[in-house]
Each structure stands twice: as structure tokens, then as C-alpha cells.
Amino acid sequence: MHYNCLIVDDEVDLSKMTCEYFEMFDISCASVETAAECEKFLKENQVDVLLMDINLSDESGFSICKKIRQESEIPILFISARQSDDDILIALNIGGDDYIKKPYSLSVLLAKVKVIIKRMVNKNTGEINKKGESFMDESTMRVHIKGKEVQLKAKEFKLFQYLFENKNMIVTKEQLFNKVWGDSYYSDGTLNVHIRRLREKIEENPNEPQMIKTIWGTGYMLEL
């Protein structure tokens, strides 16, 4: 299922009240109490925005955010009674999009969530790239190749995206390291593993790739 918002907070009454308030304004909302429940929920459902408490019974919200950021760019708003500047800086530095202190105003929180959802809708509408039979959707990290839909992980999608934007042109390993990883000092092994995973997902025969071609001694080329 698709939800606009997921609240991860062990203050059950507050989460319930927030969900009910959001639903009054047509923002579909669900809530869970633990990190484990959050992980399970995200595997089974699509969510536009996460509202994340820091202090949970099984794991900190900071830890959950770090894990999510390895795979997804879903907006994360921290909601916490912790007031220190250090907590706010940590939240933003590990990938949080905002930090709202408890007790929060429901109307202000709703306004922040609405702005993010609107921003994501506008972004996603403009970032579906179509080239013939093949296109990619950054909002879901899905790729459509000649009628086949493939779900990619975050780094796989960034790698495919750069190859797609430079399709039918040679892309060097150095370009990929800089554009995908943001660093020119990664090993060939790291790139090779991700290329292999991409081929396994989009090629009919990964051992004889017809789309992601290796240009020996130089890099790769996506032929579409």
C-alpha cells in the first residue's frame, strides 16, 4: 500500500492523535513503535515521508536513519523531545531533512509534511526520463528497459542513471567513481560488483551483456 506519512514513535497516543489529524486533511498516515516494525513496514509499503523519534525501545532513530540512507532518499523528519543543538546537528548531518521539537504543533507539522509531499510530487513528475522504450523513475528507483521493470537499490540506480544520461557514449571508470561515489579513489572491484548486479537485473544474459558493454581499459557504455 501507499502512505503519505509513517510515524515511528513509541508514544502511541501522540502518534495516534497525529495520524487522525493528518487524515482529516487527506494525508494518509500510519504509525509503528519500533525500529523493527519500521523496517518491516517499509518493505511492505510505499511511504512519502517518515516522522522519526530518536528514543525508541529497540534502536535509536539515528541508527534507523543511517540504514535507510544506504538505500533510499525518502524524506525523514525527526520529532523528538531532545532539545540540544548537538542532537539537531547529528540528525541533519546523517541525512535528516528537518528536526521538530516535541511538543509540536499539529498544524505546523502538517504544513511541513505537506510542503515535502508537494516537493516530491513536483520532483517526481519532472524526473521521469523517457527515451524510446526505456525510462527511469527517480521517485521509486525503478527502471523500465524494453518493457521490463526493474527495482534498483540506491547506488545501483545512481550508477544506471549516469550511464543512461550518457547512453551510447563511453563513460570512464573515473567519471563513474566521481559522479556516483563522489570519490575517485574507490577500487575497480567496487565498480565491477555494481556493474555485475546491474547486468543481472537488466540483461537477458548477464554473461553476454547486450546493453552495458565493457570498454576494455577505459570504462563502460550503455547501448540503447
Image (cartoon, rainbow, N blue to C red):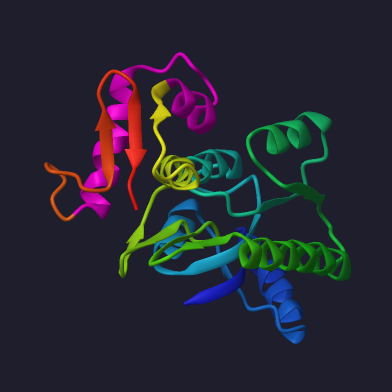
| Res 6 seen here | no
In the image, 123: left or right of 168?
Answer: right
Against 91, is 42 above or below?
A: below
Q: Nearer the viewer, residue 121 or 11?
A: 121
Q: Nearer the viewer, residue 32 or 157?
A: 157
Count of numbered badges drawn on the protein: 0
> In the image as oriented, which residue stretches furthest toward the top?
185
Report x, y in % for residue 26. Answer: 71, 84
Q: Nearer the viewer, residue 19 or 25?
A: 25
Report x, y in % for residue 27. Answer: 69, 78
> In the image as oriented, which residue stretches furthest toward the front?
168
Report x, y in % for residue 54. Answer: 65, 45
What residue is shown at x 77% (from left), y 83% (from top)?
25
Per the picture, the main secondary structure of the magenta-coloured stretch is helix
Q: Which segment is the magenta one?
A: 174-203
**Residue 171 lies in the magenta stretch:** no
What residue is shown at x 63% (from left), y 35% (from top)?
94
| Res 67 seen here | yes
Q: Quadrant of residue 66?
A: top right
Q: Nearer the viewer, residue 97 or 55?
A: 97
What residue is shown at x 42% (from left), y 65% (from top)?
132
In the image, 119: left or right of 182?
Answer: right
**Residue 201 lies in the magenta stretch:** yes
What residue is shown at x 76% (from left), y 32% (from top)?
89
Report x, y in % for residue 115. Answer: 79, 64
Q: Quadrant of residue 144?
A: bottom left
In the image, 3: left or right of 40?
Answer: right
